[in-house]
Amino acid sequence: MDASTRTATEESARREAVVECSRVTRTYERGGGGGWLSFGDGGREELPTVTALDDVSLTIERGEFVGLSGPSGSGKSTLIHLLAGLDTPSEGTVTLAGEEVSDLSQNELTRLRLEQVGIVFQRFHLLPSLSARANVALPLVERGMGKSERREEAADLLERVGLGDRQSHRPGEMSGGEQQRVAVARALAGDPLVVFADEPTGELDTDTGATILNLLGDLAEDRAVVLASHDEQALDRTDRVIRLRDGQVKSA
Ligand code: ADP
Ligand code: MG
């Protein structure tokens, strides 16, 4: 391969979209019951719907560490759920790893998510009765990987997040920062194309949070990482910030 071909290849690798959404709106009906409030006399009144996201379009490429900012209630978690294939839009399209999410069956979507998406939540969401290694290996069970291979990969991932010496610890025996590192290792199991982190430092002190942010930034080298946060210091570490307000993108 000559230099110009290599440059073109590198360029196209850099431009690979891993997740996109186009004109996405997500409304929630208030109070359930299809948005209708029934009265004893047979009359009913339509309840207002909440527009959590309003006509949002964006593209996230491989290699990017993207921040998603906005005050509480601005739609960050709703957007992450949609981009991660955990929820479907009321209007518009989401394309994840080249597949349009609404074209997929439930099984196909589950498989796509399992193979291409990792998620880190604010409250870690580890299973308390399982060791760190077993928590990390869990997504690999679902992917059908054999036991010894799983153990090996989970052990390697815990090494990668600096917890090589905590393999057998249960979540209750670890600090918040350590638990979140286990959650990052779990999100990486199976080498996903995109990792979403929804307020991952919300429960951590500043120094511990910084360790998690460094780790997430490093991961973006060969995939995409999306960090939802309302902490400007955390957002400063990202390559660019998409700003949400009242469900709309204010700047990207
Ligand atoms: P953020 O993560 O930025 O705090 P969210 O995405 O959680 O914002 O919420 C955006 C808006 O959607 C808020 O007004 C919230 O109350 C509303 N919302 C979120 N989830 C639901 C739900 N399951 N049912 C009804 N409204 C919801
Ligand atoms: Mg949120």
Image: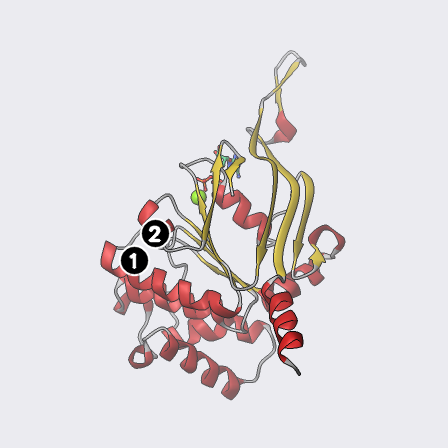
Which SS class for mark 1?
helix
Which disc number belongs to residue 209?
1
Q: How busy is the neighbourhood of tag 1: few (under 14 within 10 Å), some, or many (20 plus)? A: some
Residue 102 point in image, percent of width and height: 72, 50
**In the foreground, 94 or 64:** 64
Total tally of numbered discs in the picture: 2
Kind of residue at badge 1: Gly
Residue 182 sits in which quadrant?
bottom left
Q: Establish if 74 lies above or below 127.
A: above
Residue 69 sits in which quadrant?
top left
Residue 79 point in image, percent of width and height: 54, 45
Residue drawn 74% across and 57% down? 105
Which SS class for mark 2?
helix
Residue 29 point in image, percent of width and height: 59, 31
Is the residue under label 1 in contact with that under label 2 (CB below 8 Å)? Answer: yes
Residue drawn 50% across and 88% down? 148
Q: Which residue is mark 2?
A: 234
Farthest residue toward the bottom?
Answer: 148
Residue 76 visible here: yes
**In the foreground, 9 or 97:** 9
Kind of residue at badge 2: Ala
Comes first in the chain, label 2 or label 1: 1
Q: How busy is the neighbourhood of tag 2: few (under 14 within 10 Å), some, or many (20 plus)? A: many
Left or right: residue 183 compared with residue 141: left
Residue drawn 30% across and 67% down? 178
Q: Establish if 151 lies above or below 80.
A: below
Q: What is the distance, in whole Å, between disc 2 and disc 1 at their CAs? A: 8 Å
Left or right: residue 126 compared with residue 163: right
Residue drawn 43% across and 75% down? 134
Residue 191 sits in which quadrant?
bottom right
